[in-house]
Structures are given as structure tokens and as C-alpha cells.
Image (cartoon, helix red, strand yellow):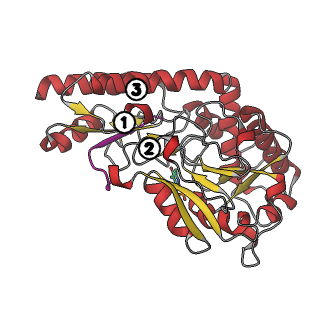
Amino acid sequence: MSRVYNFSAGPATLPEAVLQRAQQEMLDWQGSGMSTMEMSHRGKEFVSIAEQATNDLRDLLNVPENYKILFMQGGATGQFAGIPMNLLRGKTQADYFNTGQWSKKAIKEAKNYCEVNLVADSSDNNFTTIADSSEWKFNPEAAYVHYTPNETINGLEFDQIPDTGDVPLIADMSSTILSRPIDVSKFGMIYAGAQKNIGPAGVTVVIVRDDLIGQAADICPTVLDYKALDDADSMPNTPPTYTWYLAGLVFQWLKDEIGGLDKMAEINKRKAGKLYAAIDGSDFYANPVDPKYRSWMNIPFTLANTDLDKPFLAAAKEAGLATLAGHRSVGGMRASIYNAMPEAGVDALIAFMQDFEQRNA
Ligand SMILES: *Cc1c(COP(=O)(O)O)cnc(C)c1O
């Protein structure tokens, strides 16, 4: 059976070269006589894999020395609780942007630990645009400001990094990390579940400024305590070793095959640009998001005639274009075109959409 173009929002498609390398190394990793899955996480082989992955990620994102890189468990959702427990540091209030389904979940979890002030709220426009920065309402008492640069379900993306002065800015980058270069020094903390742009599900990357850790609440479990993770090189207990290894292969692919994040950004911008142009150029398809805030990674679209939704998905599947159904809360279609989606996959989708329109308009 041949591989399809998989537009899943997450877990998402992985670079074929990475899967092939994992396959080659499956039974015998570099002469060790065992799979990376079977190694002790304390042994020198796995420790070298973990260190290489951490160093490659630091390199790719140009992470300054005073930031810790942690590999954690519990997903981005675990961090929704981990962030207030670690970063309130004695304060009782935090600022949150509400710009989509993932913001909403982060806010709901944070309310278990602190008072939440909304800096901006896109719920009244169905998460299709973001208030102008002149209207943002920051609370000077906030311990931190949390936002979701790219809302995976709504396809809504910030066009700037909010300026929060001395208040640490926290970003849920689950669906946008590594899609382009970022200035890490503008953030107090960045975090991302792996299953969109990093690797398979099971690991959560946390990049946190070192002066912010070490003041976790007493109730914070060890596995969510950034200081405890850092002290143990992300191994206070058994880490998800195979996911960590595969994340490392993805980082090497980004460095060696793609040529770094500037190159990745060029490709991503081009992929998204041509798909939006195809949608906007037709009355048959539509994207509801304010063009200023359209995501590079997740592109929802609707058919003018919703009776054609099911036939569209069926014909797409037949054509080798998989997992295009929109999120159940939004409906329609969604094409997730993360780093690992080749440009040829986007070209194939556009050609299919144009052909489907001709046959059904
Ligand atoms: C997928 C996603 C999450 C949830 O990640 P889990 O690892 O399943 O907890 C959170 N935030 C964003 C922006 C996401 O895309």
C-alpha cells in the first residue's frame, strides 16, 4: 500500500525520511543490538540520543543560554495546569488571550489555580479575528500573560508577538513551533505538544527562562515541576524514550534536509499562500478567518453547498488525500499543512479541489 497525503491536525503526518530512518534503526540502533525503545533511559546510548535532540532543538530555535529545554509528559493540556502551578510565584492573577478552542481550555484549567483576566476575547466573532492591540487590556497584577499564537481548530494566528513588558509572556506553540524562526528571548516560556510539528504524541517540549523556575506551588506534582525536571535532565521518572528519539530525528531532518527554519518558513509561507489563493479565487470554497490572522498551519474551509461535504471527503479520500474533515466544533473541512506536509501534497489538494468544483459546480 502506498502512503497518502495526510492532512490530520494531530497526531499528524511525519517526514517520510524520518520514518524510513526509524525503520532502518528499529531492530539495532547504531550497533547497540537493540531498539531505542528497549534501552534504559539512564544508559549512555539513550542519554546521547536525548542530549543530541536537546542540542539540535536549541540550535534550530536559537534558544539563548538562560533558557532551559525540558521534555515532559502530560501533553499541552498538562501544561494548562503546570503553568499556573509553576509561574504564579505567589501571585493570584494571570492574563489570558481567548482566541480559540485551545485558549478556552487553557483558561478553564487556569481558573482552578488563579483569577483569570481576559486581555482580548474573540468568542463574540466565533474566533475568526483578533482585537487590535490598542484594545488589549493587560492587568498590572498578572503573574504572566498566556496566549495561543496559532489556534489549531479555528485556523487563527497572531500576526505579532504581544509586547507584555516585564510580565513574562507564555505561548502555547503546539501547532506552530518550528514552522519559522522565532525570537525566544521575547518569551518567559514556550511549550508544545509533539504531535503536530515535532514528532509522535507523547512528549511535550517546554522552553522556559531560568529565573522563572524554582518557585512552584507546594501542590505541584514532581512531573509538572520545571525545576524538578531541569534538575533531573528531564528524567525525574522514565521519559517517553521512543517519542524523544523520533523528535530528535525530526530535528535532524529540519537541519540537514530542509536547511533550517528560514528555509522551512519560506516553504510553509508558499504552501499556505497557494491554498488560500485557491480558496479565495473560487465561490465554491470559503475560509471564514480575517485574512490578517490566517494560519500557515491549519486551514479550515467550507463548501458553499454543504450537501457536498460528504461527497467531497469521500472523493478526496479516493484521490489519496486523507483526514480533511473539519473539527466537530467548526464543521466543513480543515487542511493541516504542518512542516512534514510536502508542497506536492498541497499542490495535489488544490488540483483536486479545482477538479471537484468543475464536476459539481
Ligand atoms: C493539540 C493542541 C493542544 C492539546 O495538546 P495535547 O498534547 O493533546 O494536550 C493544545 N494546544 C494547541 C494549540 C494544540 O494544537
Q: Does residue 26 show up?
A: no
Which residue is tagged 1?
Answer: 290
Q: Which residues are magenta?
A: 328-337
Quarter-wise, where is residue 261 in the image? top right
Q: Work out whether 308 lies above or below 281.
A: below
For the C terminus, the image quarter is top left
Contact between labelled residues 2 and 3, with CB atoms less than 8 Å apart: no
Residue visible at 78% across and 43% down in the picture: 54
In the image: residue 335, left or right of residue 262:
left
Disc 3 marks which amino acid? Val
Quarter-wise, where is residue 78 in the image? bottom right
Q: Nearer the viewer, mark 3 or mark 1?
A: 1
Which residue is tagged 2?
Answer: 130
Ligand 1 within 8 angstroms of badge 1 C-beta: no
Disc 2 marks which amino acid? Ile
Contact between labelled residues 2 and 1, with CB atoms less than 8 Å apart: yes
